[in-house]
C-alpha cells in the first residue's frame, strides 16, 4: 500500500516562519499542485536551520500527522471514509482539518488532539482553515435538508454563511474574512463588502491588501481572476 500524503508544512519553531504545500494524493508523483507562504520567507537570511517538517495524510487505514518523523495517529479509518482537507501552523500549533466517519463529522485536530466541530447529526466536512491572531477559523459545510449550508466555525462556534452551499478556501486578516466557495453550481467569493460571482471551478484564493486573486479553470482554460476580472493563462484546450 502506498501512503497518501496530502499536506506538507515547514515551520521554524523559534520565529514561527512557515511554508505550506498541498501535494497530490500519490507520493510517487512527488509534485505540488499549489503552495502558499508568508511574505518574506525566502528573504529571511537569519532563519534558523532547525526546520520542522509537518506532513499529514493516510497510511494504510490510518489518518496520520507527522512532525518530522514522529507520527501521531489522528484516526483509524480507511481513505474515502475520512480525509484530511487542510492544514495550518500558527502560535506554535499545528492545525489539521477534515472529516471522518463517512462525512458524518467535521473535525479539527490541534497538535493531534481531535475536536468535533459539527453536531454529528448531519453530513459535514471541514475543508479549509485560517488563523488570525488567536482566532482559528475552520470552514466547510454541514448538510441541512434539503441542501448544504456553508459553515464557518470560529473558535469552534458555528456560523452559517448565507448564499453559499460550501466553502473551499478562507482567508482572515485583522478580523476581516474572505471566503471562496460555491452556491449550487455557481462559483463565488465574498469579501467583507461584497459577493462576486465567477464561472468555472476554483479552490485557490490569495488576498493582497484590497485585491482578491482566484485561480482555477474555466471553459477548458487555465485562468485567474483579479477582483472578479477574468484573465486567461492558457488558450490550449484542456489546460
Image (cartoon, helix red, strand yellow):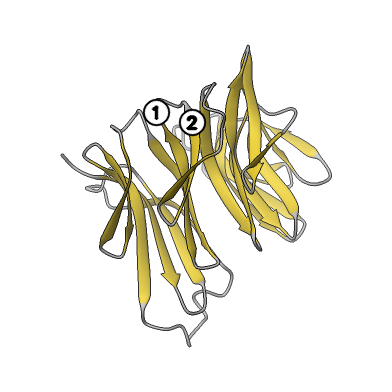
Q: Which mark is residue 105?
A: 2
Local crowd size for mark 2, using a 10 Å CA cut-off: few (<14), some (14–19), many (≥20): many
Q: Is residue 195 visible?
A: yes
Residue that appears at 53% across and 28% down: 124
**Front in this rendered view, residue 52 or 91:** 91
Residue that appears at 45% across and 35% down: 99
Local crowd size for mark 1, using a 10 Å CA cut-off: few (<14), some (14–19), many (≥20): some
Residue that appears at 52% across and 39% down: 127
Left or right placement of residue 95 versus residue 146 in this view: left
Task: Tell me whether circle 1 and circle 2 mark residues in contact (CB < 8 Å).
Answer: yes
- Residue 182 in the image, given as x and y percentages of width and height: 63, 30
Location of residue 46 with respect to 162 vertically, above or below: below
- Residue 210 in the image, given as x and y percentages of width and height: 77, 57
Instruction: Residue 214: name its quadrant.
Output: top right
Location of residue 77 with respect to 29 vertically, above or below: above
Location of residue 30 with respect to 195 vertically, above or below: below
Question: Label 1 vs label 2: CA separation?
Answer: 7 Å
**Front in this rendered view, residue 215 or 40:** 40
Q: Classify the position of the N terminus by image quarter.
A: top left
Left or right placement of residue 139 versus residue 12 in this view: right
Considering every residue shown, the one lying at the far bottom of the view is 46
**Front in this rendered view, residue 134 or 166:** 134
- Residue 40 in the image, given as x and y percentages of width and height: 56, 75
Tell me the element at label 1: loop
Q: Which mark is residue 101?
A: 1
Tell me the element at label 2: strand
Q: Classify the position of the C terminus by image quarter.
A: top left
Amino acid at each position: 500500500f502506498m501512503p497518501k500524503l496530502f499536506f506538507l508544512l515547514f515551520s521554524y519553531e523559534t520565529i514561527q516562519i512557515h511554508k505550506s504545500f498541498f501535494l497530490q494524493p500519490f507520493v510517487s508523483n512527488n509534485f505540488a499542485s499549489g503552495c502558499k507562504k508568508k511574505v518574506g520567507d525566502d528573504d529571511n537570511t537569519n532563519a534558523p536551520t532547525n526546520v520542522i517538517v509537518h506532513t499529514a495524510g493516510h497510511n494504510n487505514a490510518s489518518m496520520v500527522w507527522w512532525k518530522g518523523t514522529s507520527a501521531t495517529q489522528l484516526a483509524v479509518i480507511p481513505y474515502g471514509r475520512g480525509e484530511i482537507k487542510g492544514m495550518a501552523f500558527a502560535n506554535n500549533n499545528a492545525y489539521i482539518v477534515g472529516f471522518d466517519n463517512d462525512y458524518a463529522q467535521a473535525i479539527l485536530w490541534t497538535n493531534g488532539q481531535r475536536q468535533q466541530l459539527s453536531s454529528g447529526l448531519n453530513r459535514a466536512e471541514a475543508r479549509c482553515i485560517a488563523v488570525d491572531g488567536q482566532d482559528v477559523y475552520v470552514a466547510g459545510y454541514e448538510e441541512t435538508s434539503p441542501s448544504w449550508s456553508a459553515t464557518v466555525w470560529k473558535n469552534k462556534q458555528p456560523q452559517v454563511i448565507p448564499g453559499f452551499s460550501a466553502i473551499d478556501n478562507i482567508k482572515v486578516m485583522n478580523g476581516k474574512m474572505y471566503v471562496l466557495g460555491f452556491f449550487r453550481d455557481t462559483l463565488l467569493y465574498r469579501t467583507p463588502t461584497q459577493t462576486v460571482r465567477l464561472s468555472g471551478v476554483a479552490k485557490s484564493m490569495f488576498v493582497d491588501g484590497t485585491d482578491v486573486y482566484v485561480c482555477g479553470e474555466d471553459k477548458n482554460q487555465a485562468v485567474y481572476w483579479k477582483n472578479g476580472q477574468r484573465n486567461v493563462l492558457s488558450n490550449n484546450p484542456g489546460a
